[in-house]
Image (cartoon, rainbow, N blue to C red):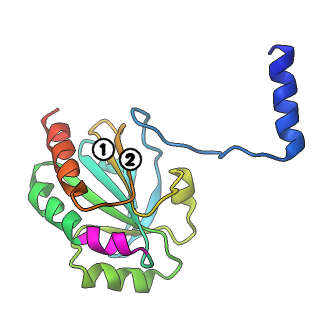
Amino acid sequence: MNMYKQKFFSFILLLGISFPAYSVSVNQKAPDFTLRSSTQINTRLAELRGNVIMLNFWATWCNPCRVEMPKLQKLYQQYKDIGFITLGVNIDKNSVKAAKMARDLGAKFPILFDNTQKVSKLYSIKAMPMTILIDRDGKIRNLYQGYKPGYEKKYAKAIRALLKE
C-alpha cells in the first residue's frame, strides 16, 4: 500500500468512520440465510437454488409496502408453477402483527421474519420496500429500492427473462 493510501485509511480510522460490513450488488452471489416463516418452518435461501427467487424486504409501517404486496401476490400466482418463488422478508420486531398484515393484504407467498434484522443488515437494506431478484444459480440479478406504481411491470419483465435462462 502506498503512503497516500495508508494516510487516508489512518485518517478515516481516526475520524471513527466505519464502512458497512456487508453490501450486495448485481451479479454477486446472494448471501445465504435461514429465517423462520409464517408457517413456523425455517426457510434457508440456499435450499431454494434452482428457482428464480424474489426477496421482498418490507415492514408494517411502510405504506408503499402495503400497495406493493397484492401486486407481488399476483406475480407469485402467475409464475409459481414454473420455477418462481417470492419470499416476503419482514423486518418488524412483532411477527404476529406482520403475519396479520400479510394475510389481510392477501399474500399467499412465504413470509419470513427477520425480527433481529440480521438478514436486512446482511443485504444492506436502506429503503423500504427493497426487492431483489436472484437467478437459478443464486446470483443477484436485479435490485429495486422503494416502490412506485408500475414497478410490477419491471419485475414481471425481469422474472420472465430469468425464467427463460
Q: Is residue 99 above or below residue 139?
A: below
Name the foreground residue: 3 vs 121.
3
Mark 1–mark 2 CB contact (< 8 Å): yes
- Give the CA separation, mark 1 to mark 2: 6 Å
Q: Residue at x 35, y 70 (%)?
A: 65
Could you say where residue 58 lies in the image, as x and y percent from the top left?
40, 67
Image quarter (top left, top right, bottom left or bottom right) of the N terminus: top right
Image quarter (top left, top right, bottom left or bottom right) of the C terminus: top left
Q: Amino acid at mark 2?
A: Ala
Quarter of the view holding residue 34: bottom left
Could you say where residue 46 lies in the image, as x and y percent from the top left?
38, 47
Q: Which mark is residue 49?
A: 1
Q: Residue at x 48, y 69 (%)?
A: 91
Quickly name the residue at label 2. Answer: 46
Could you say where residue 144 lies in the image, as x and y percent from the top left?
36, 50
Q: Is residue 24 left or right of residue 37?
A: right
* Stretch in magenta: 62-69
Q: Is residue 110 above or below residue 101?
A: above
Q: Residue at x 40, y 63 (%)?
A: 129
Q: Amino acid at mark 1?
A: Arg
Residue 68 magenta-highlighted: yes
Could you say where residue 111 lies in the image, as x and y percent from the top left?
34, 70
Q: Is residue 161 above or below residue 96?
A: above
Q: Is residue 105 above or below residue 130?
A: below
